């Protein structure tokens, strides 16, 4: 990484952490620690379990992001390996911040170990990012068309404009699928070439991406419904708008941005306990699982590499220093 790129990356991370800290302070300063704990305790266990189920479904969808990318580069890597790389990369990357960079680096460690090139890994990361964008685009279209009043109120636009923007989201998704069918000429970016995915993969990206965000919205709704009667559409609207804000700010894990945006959209319907519980379920628990898994797999990778090196040394003794070879004459 060049000096300017390194400075930009670290500067963005510092800004993101600073902004996250400020927003967390703004969001939590009006509550005492006891109030936060009591608010979390007020959520019934049944709601927690259902939220965990929706969270698990979301992370299962996230493995589909990588699966479509791996199939796009025409690699037949087995799904369990894809799922491992995806979960560790996103379980860590979504909490670390700059998910595209951090999760991409983690993915490279796994996929390179399994024989993929740097270009292939870059394409997998790109396709994963496209799936995120398509999923957010389609769910945005759904909430703008189905719940124009809340969107209009928050964005200070009319309901008709909200519905128009929602329709535009659908059109853009359809255009992506159409281009996948008709645009087959490769696009060249420096030394790398990129071609549109097949129609099958494009449709799968839209479906998996949309279902993923729909499940995360359901997770958030389930926790808020513990204390308030929250509709799914309103929860989905809050989550979509929060994600747009997160993409703009690059705050690590959306820390602070998610809470402030959802609180602004939902008002008193979004209790502080529901927001804290959501962060624990969707970010902290996967991070706590992914971290030891990554350490174990790293140890396995290193052990295999060492074993392979020892085997090669044993198999090729002639590669030793010629000065130490005794002549037979």
Image (cartoon, rainbow, N blue to C red):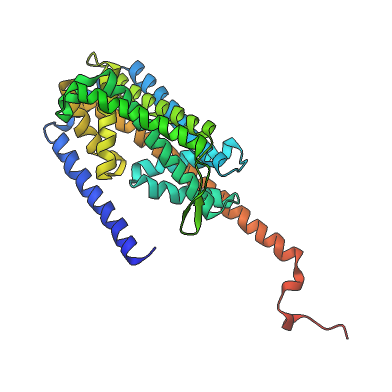
Whether 92 is drawn above or below 9: the answer is: above
**Foreground residue among 233 and 282:** 233
**Foreground residue among 85 and 50:** 85
| Residue 149: quarter of image | top left
Whether 32 is drawn above or below 100: the answer is: above
Residue 29 visible? The answer is yes
In the displayed structure, does residue 63 sit left or right of residue 28?
right
Q: Position of residue 190 (x, y in %)?
A: 46, 59
Q: Residue at x 49, y 47 (%)?
A: 123
In the displayed structure, does residue 164 sit left or right of residue 284?
left
Q: Residue furthest right?
A: 329
Q: Residue furthest left?
A: 30
Q: Residue furthest top?
A: 229
In the displayed structure, does residue 124 sit left or right of residue 8?
right
For the C terminus, which image quadrant? bottom right
- For the image, the number of numbered tags is 0
| Residue 256: quarter of image | top left
Residue 63 visible? The answer is no
Q: Residue at x 16, y 40 (%)?
A: 25
Q: Position of residue 148 (x, y in %)?
A: 22, 21
Q: Position of residue 185 (x, y in %)?
A: 52, 46
Q: Residue at x 51, y 52 (%)?
A: 193
For the N terminus, which image quadrant? bottom left
Q: Position of residue 320 (x, y in %)?
A: 72, 74
Q: Residue at x 25, y 31 (%)?
A: 241
């Amino acid at each position: 990484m060049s000096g300017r790129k390194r400075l930009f990356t670290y500067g963005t991370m510092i800004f993101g952490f600073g902004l996250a800290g400020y927003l967390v302070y703004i969001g939590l300063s009006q509550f005492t620690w006891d109030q936060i704990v009591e608010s979390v305790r007020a959520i019934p266990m049944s709601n927690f379990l259902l939220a965990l189920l929706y969270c698990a479904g979301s992370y299962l969808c996230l493995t589909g992001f990588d699966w479509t990318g791996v199939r796009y580069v025409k690699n037949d890597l087995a799904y369990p390996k894809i799922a491992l790389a995806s979960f560790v990369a996103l379980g860590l990357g979504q909490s670390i911040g700059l998910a595209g960079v951090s999760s991409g680096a983690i993915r490279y460690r796994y996929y390179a170990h399994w024989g993929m090139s740097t270009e292939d890994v870059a394409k997998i990361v790109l396709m994963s990012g496209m799936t995120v964008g398509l999923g957010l685009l389609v769910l945005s279209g759904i909430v703008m068309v189905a719940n124009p009043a809340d969107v209009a109120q928050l964005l200070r636009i009319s309901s008709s404009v909200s519905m128009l923007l929602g329709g535009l989201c659908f059109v853009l998704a359809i255009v992506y699928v159409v281009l996948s069918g008709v645009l087959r000429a490769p696009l060249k970016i420096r030394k790398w070439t990129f071609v549109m995915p097949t129609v099958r993969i494009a449709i799968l990206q839209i479906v998996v991406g949309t279902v993923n965000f729909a499940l995360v919205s359901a997770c958030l709704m389930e926790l808020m419904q513990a204390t308030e009667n929250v509709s799914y559409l309103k929860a989905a609207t809050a989550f979509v708008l929060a994600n747009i804000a997160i993409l703009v700010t690059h705050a690590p894990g959306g820390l602070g941005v998610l809470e402030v945006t959802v609180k602004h959209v939902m008002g008193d319907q979004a209790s502080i306990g529901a927001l804290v519980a959501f962060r624990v379920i969707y970010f902290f628990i996967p991070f706590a699982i992914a971290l030891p898994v990554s350490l174990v797999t790293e140890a396995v990778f290193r052990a295999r590499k060492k074993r392979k090196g020892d085997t090669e040394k044993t198999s090729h003794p002639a590669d030793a220093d010629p000065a130490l070879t005794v002549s037979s004459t």
